[in-house]
Image (cartoon, rainbow, N blue to C red):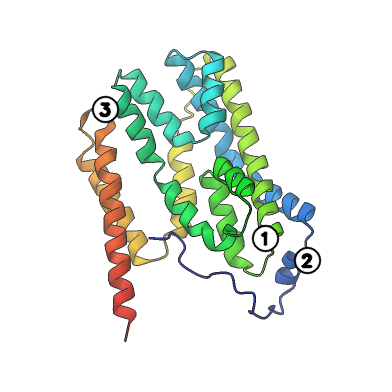
Amino acid sequence: MSPTPAPRPDDQQPVADDPAVRRALSRTPREAFLHGMIQSIPLLIVIIPFGLLFGVVATEAGMDILQVMGFSVLVLAGASQFTAVQLITENAPTIIVIISALAVNLRMAMYSASLVPWLGGATGAQKAWVAYSMIDQTYVLSIQHYEKYPRLTMTQRLAYFAGAAVALCGPWMIATWLGATAGKAIPDDIALDFALPITFIAMIAPILRTPGHLAACFVSIVAALIFAGLPSGLGLLVAAPLGMITGAVVEVWTEQRKLP
């Protein structure tokens, strides 16, 4: 199931008589990069508290600064990092920590699949860089931009993605460092954990466009609640595939109903 099934690039599509479209298509790579950075700024409201919180949680779990920063720089996946740290704190087996972190990041596989029509012609090095810097926020911003302006060149698409990645991933790492170094000075009564659910709701809700998306969302939420009592976060490992399978089945069923 693709998170964003339509539209796709169409070089034959006539340029709309819309100043915004013409302005987007005329941007130089540098301008497209800056545009990506500017459109990312509002998301810093959740990125920075999220990074601060991870730094605090990771140090409280017994990690030193080097380990915390290695985690954020090498993994660069906030939800998986939180999941892994939480399970490490609970002394879960290593294999459970690894599988749970991978399960949380399974959505990246769907993100990657939906970006193929837009970035499939990039070089191997460019794809590797996009894969490394793809987080929820860079993906959502970029796919919405590509769908809004399907006649962008490959250079413009990559430049926009790069701008979003620099604007979001850099502050995430800096916030993680601040949380790890100064986290103990933050009073316990200042709650930072609001960032995680707000981030997901704000990003995911607008792209729940098809019955398959809604079915996958509903089943995964219900399953996560039902299996919340399983040890070591195993409920997530059950809920995630159930949601994906449901979404895929509904998506196929919906497409079949459209056929004459």
Nearest to N terminus: mark 2 or mark 3: 2
Quick one: SS at disc 3? helix
| Residue placed most toward the observer, 187 or 51 | 51
Kind of element beneath mark 1: helix
Q: CA distance from mark 2 to mark 1?
A: 13 Å
2 and 3 marks in contact (CB < 8 Å): no
Counting residues from the start of the chain, the first of labels 1 and 3 encountered is: 1
Q: Disc 2 or disc 1, which is closer to the eye? A: 1
* 35 left or right, relative to 55: right
Q: Residue furthest front?
A: 124
Residue 191 pos. (x, y %): 47, 27
Circle 3 sits on which residue? 232
Query: Does any portion of residue 190 appear in the rendered image?
Result: yes
* Three-letter code for the amino acid on which mark 1 is drawn: Met
Amino acid type at circle 3 is: Ser
Q: Quadrant of the C terminus?
A: bottom left
